[in-house]
């Protein structure tokens, strides 16, 4: 979230297992998180919240927009939903985090051999999700010591670890450059440099 006045609604859907070990709906909580995000953004401190579960209002879909569980059908029809969940909102600087669509180049010969990912850069990791609303990434690329990031043919970002290399790109040059700068920590270096210069002038 890049702005403290963002309008964001969070939906939490909780499921359990029936006798056939199939996931079944337990309860759902829908939260207007605008104020919570503002408070986290301004304070820079993790915020912990508790919310009660209610009936199913928004169909939860995941893994390619397929339903994750049966709704209120069967023995669960008309069942009273109760209980609560707790969740945390952690502040992340947009200097080091980013999200959006990245394309992975799978072949240097076949131009159509590409795979689209919804990518999330956070905690020095690049998480690649098959779909925007998936909860677990398909690929996790560590951006730690030993990971090398460079331009490849000026249109692709090459990320190399000890085990594998990825070639990523976007159609938009501005976004491609922004991804490269955040992946390499360029913005963080510029910020740190500015802070040091400012402190030196104050002293």
Image: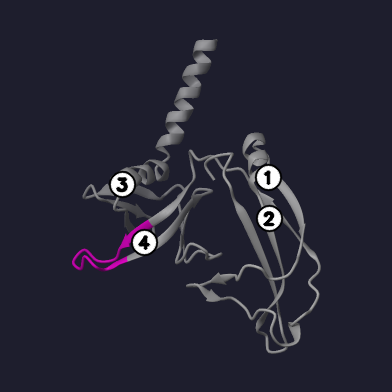
Instruction: Answer left or right for 26 relative to 106.
Output: right
Disc ID at residue 36: 1
Nearer to the camera, 66 or 134: 66
What residue would you read off at disc 3?
A: 150
Disc ID at residue 164: 4
Q: Quadrant of the N terminus?
A: top right
Q: Mark 4 falls on what kind of element?
A: loop
Q: Residue 111 colored magenta? A: yes
> How much space separates mark 4 and mark 1, taking CA atoms?
39 Å
Is 86 above or below relative to 124? below
Sequence-first tag of 2 and 1: 2
What is the span of residues highlighted in magenta in the rendered image? 102-114
Quarter assignment of residue 42: top right
What residue would you read off at disc 2?
A: 31
Q: Residue 165 colored magenta? A: no
Neighbour tally class for label 1: few under 14, some 14-19, many 20 plus, Cα within 10 Å: some
Instruction: Answer left or right for 160 relative to 200.
Output: left
Quarter assignment of residue 136: bottom right
* Callouts 3 and 2 close, C-beta under 8 Å: no
Q: Mark 3 falls on what kind of element?
A: strand
Q: Position of residue 107 (x, y in %)?
A: 24, 66
């Amino acid at each position: 979230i890049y702005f403290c006045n963002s309008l964001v609604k969070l939906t939490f859907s909780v499921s359990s297992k029936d006798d056939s070990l199939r996931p079944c709906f337990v309860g759902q909580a829908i939260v207007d998180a605008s104020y919570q995000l503002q408070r986290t953004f301004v304070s820079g401190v993790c915020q912990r919240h508790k919310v009660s579960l209610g009936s199913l209002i928004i169909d939860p879909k995941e893994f390619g927009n397929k339903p994750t569980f049966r709704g209120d059908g069967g023995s669960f029809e008309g069942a009273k939903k109760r209980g609560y969940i707790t969740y945390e909102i952690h502040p992340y600087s947009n200097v080091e985090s980013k999200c959006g669509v990245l394309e992975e180049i799978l072949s240097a010969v076949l131009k159509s051999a590409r795979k689209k990912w919804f990518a999330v850069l956070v905690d020095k990791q690049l998480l690649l999700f098959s779909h925007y609303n998936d909860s677990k990434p398909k690929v996790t690329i560590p951006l730690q010591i030993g990971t090398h990031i460079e331009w490849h043919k000026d249109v692709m970002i090459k990320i190399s670890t000890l085990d594998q290399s990825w070639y990523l790109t976007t159609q938009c040059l501005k976004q491609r450059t922004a991804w490269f700068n955040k992946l390499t920590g360029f913005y963080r270096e510029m910020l740190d440099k500015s802070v040091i210069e400012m402190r030196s002038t104050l002293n």
